[in-house]
């Protein structure tokens, strides 16, 4: 079998695939897009795959025997196979399409948590979590009487594994944590933390929204029970995401939602639910969005995720240096060599929102606010921060321009 040759990584060439980056549409300036931690842009290959489905083959999946339905069904399931390959899952039926990371985590909390937790049980989270990996567990705790506990941080902004060890006990039923912090860029020791949690019999959930698009992911090597991530953070469309779950656990769970597709039989007396993965995909699924996600995965595999990680490290190190040159700047989280491809920071005496607004006027899009991580910001004793997050199409020249613009912005605001 001939092995497909990956492209030589070239961010300038890659940018040619992204229509939004090749137009002067943002304040009559070329767009410098550093908000990839929230959502990435889309290559033409993804847009064309989705457009082609709408124009040539669109129909509902798994329900029709006509040609259009068969074509859409085949493309939809092909996307599932692409996800399985991309994260090295054992079986395609372990891949559940959802609307995104948020729905994936809520599905676990409802389908597994409601059936297995009781008063006095404990749910272990971390201070780094996005609200989507906090609120569903708090809701579960309210429903069941369980307790939510939080792993604290070290002074360097990384997870304190000794504190985690001290919190684990026979009462710990779930440990759920992000593989990468969307604010600090801290990387969790997924394999070690998973082993620690499993040593007391806990279920392990990994919010991988900030790592799957950037780092090679191997769910079998990680050893966790569930992995959740979103398409819109990895060149795919919004409205689609993935829940990967261990087959034996998924088969033990009741459906999260009821309706069409997820059933085997329905009578006036009741129903029986279907097999995996249909059991957890009630109603008409995100057909075209899933096909777009499959195209995004094909694109990323052609580029090579390992090269993306290396490229982002070059960008983040330079951004770290430039931001630290700004008077009053404080970068949140670990050192440049110990983080993923994002930098969050505050400037003493200057509001983060004002920085973002003035950078936007120069065509530079960063994010300002609490980044859906209010407990972390409270822990850091700040209300908001600025975040510049990078991806495969960003360049060193763009980072340099941001650094120069940031200095001018801060001078103006003071």
Image (cartoon, rainbow, N blue to C red):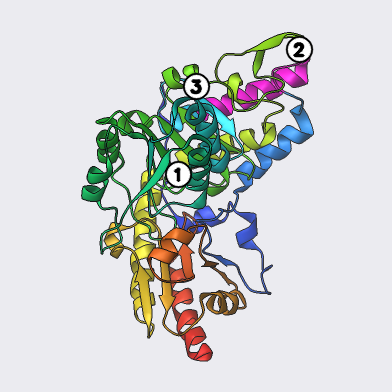
Residue 197's place in the image compared with 266, above or below, is below
Q: Is residue 72 magenta?
A: yes
Q: Which residue is mark 1?
A: 303
Of the residues under marks 1 and 3, which one precedes in the sequence? 3
Q: Which residue is mark 3?
A: 92
Q: Which mark is residue 378?
A: none
Q: Is residue 233 magenta?
A: no
Distance CA(mark 2)–CA(mark 3): 22 Å
Of the residues under marks 2 and 3, which one precedes in the sequence? 2
Q: Position of residue 294 (x, y in %)?
A: 57, 34
The magenta span reads: 61-82
- 154 vs 93, left or right, is left
Between marks 1 and 3 in the image, the one whose residue lies nearer the viewer: 3
Between marks 2 and 3 in the image, the one whose residue lies nearer the viewer: 3
Q: Position of residue 91 (x, y in %)?
A: 45, 20
Secondary structure category for the residue under label 2: loop
Let me know if residue 283 appears in the view: yes
Q: Residue at x 44, y 65 (%)?
A: 377
Q: Mark 2 and mark 3 in contact? Answer it, CB < 8 Å.
A: no
Secondary structure category for the residue under label 1: helix
Q: Which residue is mark 2?
A: 65
């Amino acid at each position: 079998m001939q092995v497909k040759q990956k492209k030589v990584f070239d961010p300038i060439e890659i940018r040619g695939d992204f229509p939004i980056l090749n137009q002067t549409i943002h304040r009559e300036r070329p767009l410098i897009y550093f908000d990839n931690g929230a959502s990435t842009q889309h290559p033409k290959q993804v847009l064309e795959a989705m457009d082609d489905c709408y124009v040539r083959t669109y129909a509902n999946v798994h329900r029709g025997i006509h040609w259009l339905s068969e074509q859409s069904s085949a493309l939809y399931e092909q996307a599932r196979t692409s996800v399985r390959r991309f994260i090295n899952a054992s079986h395609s039926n372990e891949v559940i399409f959802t609307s995104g990371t948020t729905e994936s985590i809520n599905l676990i909390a409802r389908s597994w948590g409601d059936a297995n937790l009781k008063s006095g049980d404990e749910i272990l989270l971390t201070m780094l979590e996005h609200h989507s990996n906090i609120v569903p567990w708090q809701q579960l705790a309210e429903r069941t009487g369980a307790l939510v506990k939080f792993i604290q941080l070290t002074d360097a902004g990384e997870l304190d594994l000794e504190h985690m060890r001290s919190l684990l006990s026979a009462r710990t039923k779930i440990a759920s944590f992000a593989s990468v912090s969307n604010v600090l860029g801290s990387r969790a020791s997924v394999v070690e933390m998973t082993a620690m949690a499993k040593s007391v019999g806990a279920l392990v959930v990994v919010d991988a929204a900030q790592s799957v698009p950037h780092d090679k992911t191997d769910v079998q090597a990680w050893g966790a029970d569930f992995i959740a991530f979103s398409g819109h953070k990895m060149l795919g469309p919004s409205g689609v995401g993935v829940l990967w779950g261990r087959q034996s656990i998924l088969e033990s769970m009741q459906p999260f939602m009821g309706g069409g597709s997820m059933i085997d039989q329905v009578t006036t007396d009741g129903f029986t639910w279907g097999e995996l993965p249909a059991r957890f995909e009630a109603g008409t699924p995100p057909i075209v969005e899933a096909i777009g996600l499959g195209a995004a995965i094909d694109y990323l595999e052609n580029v090579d995720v390992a090269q993306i990680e290396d490229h982002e490290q070059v960008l983040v190190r330079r951004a770290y240096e430039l931001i630290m040159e700004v008077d009053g700047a404080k970068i949140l989280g670990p050192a440049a060599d110990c983080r993923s491809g994002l930098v969050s920071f505050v400037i003493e005496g200057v509001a983060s929102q004002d920085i973002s607004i003035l950078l936007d006027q120069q065509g530079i899009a960063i994010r300002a606010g609490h980044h859906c991580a209010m407990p972390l910001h409270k822990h850091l004793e700040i209300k908001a921060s600025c975040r510049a997050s990078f991806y495969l199409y960003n360049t060193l020249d763009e980072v340099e321009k941001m650094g120069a613009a940031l200095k001018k912005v801060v001078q103006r605001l003071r």
